[in-house]
Image (spheres, rainbow, N blue to C red):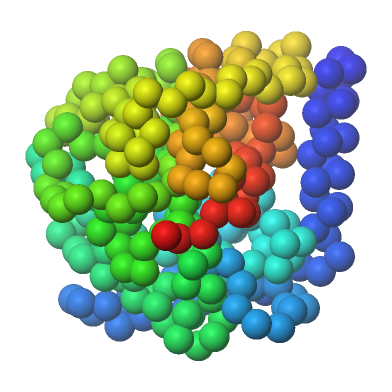
Amino acid sequence: MNRSRVFRNLIAAAMLLAGAAHAAVQQQLSFDAPGGARQYILAAPAAPGPGARPLVLLLHGHIGTAANALGQGVVPSPLSAWLAIVDREDLLVAALQGLKGSDHRTGWHDCRGDDTRNPDADDVAFAAGVAAGLVQAGRADPRRIYVMGMSNGGMMAYRLALEMHPVPAAIAAVSSSMAGSSSCRGVPPRVSVLLINGDADPIVPYGGGKVSGSLVIGAAASRDFWLHADGLAGAAPAASIFPHLSADDPTRASKLVYGPNDGPQVEMITIQNGGHVEPSLKYHYGWLYRQLVGRQNEDFESAEEAWSFFRDKRSQ
């Protein structure tokens, strides 16, 4: 094992131990949404502090599950890193379960009006209802609601940013883009947005194009949409490059941050040579999966980057 990989593994272990004093408690819960009961898993601190706390709605990708997103299954999703953050930062994570569409695979009714596979469900009402219920119970802070989604889940995160009430303070969309033929309407609210995209993504084209027959506008165009919505069009970004931790990793990660810390922000992370997968220090997929989705960046933990972005954001 080379030195860079040892260093990367030490960082991952330190992050894991930082949240390992207690294990986050997971509950399988049900919500009476339009069209029938919907399922979600709520992860909460083992020893919660008093008062309302931040809430992160977590959205799995197409064919995924809420359980896999929170560490269950043969190969846990990199989103599983949220479990350590839950306990360390005293917050709630609700992993929502999508329904099956016409392809008999789980997914979300995002803004793509030309998609024929996604379920015809009111996923906005589902997500909003879960958040509102936790707010009404005094467990979640209505000004600190955040959304993170992967792939189809990231596309659904964009829809929630546009249509959900209470309005999320910030979202993170991974390996996803906004719809080219959108069924979402209305004036977009001021929502902070984090985009994480690989420029060699074989499933959601970085520059825009077709995703299983539906049109997406691409990473840069999605960024520009939110720069305009947040009043940041023309703003000069702060640029940085993530330290590269493994000589075995052919990808590189760079970041552009638009806007001040005390207002709406847009952050765009591009993974050079990266595929359709969440970057992660700890949760790595194997050779076969890489043949399908491309290379996974190993220089940072996506969930940790999302929490760093979310932490100080409040809804307007």
Specify whether 162 is left or right of 261.
left
Q: Nearer the viewer, residue 166 or 156?
A: 166
Q: In the image, residue 38 lies at what x, y percent?
A: 33, 74
Instruction: Determine whether 287 is above or below 60 in the image.
Output: above
Is 155 situated left or right of 195 in this image?
A: left
User: Vertical placement of 289 versus 231: above or below?
Assistant: above
In this rendering, does residue 152 appear at all?
no
Q: In the picture, which quadrant includes the N terminus? A: top right
Quarter of the image where one finds residue 44: bottom right
Instruction: Measuring from the top left, give residue 177's x and y in whole percent.
Output: 32, 33
Asked if residue 172 lies left or right of residue 106, the reply is right
Q: How far across and down, in percent of the image, does residue 231 sit?
A: 35, 38
Is 117 situated above or below 83? above
- Horizontally, residue 211 falls left or right of residue 172, namely left
31 shown above or below 110: below
| The quarter of the displayed image where residue 226 is located | top left
- Of residues 102 and 24, the one nearer the viewer is 24
Quarter containing the C terminus: bottom left
The residue under the point 54% across, 85% down is 138
Residue at left 15%, top 59%?
120
- Estimate the x, y position of residue 87 in percent, counting from the top left: 73, 65
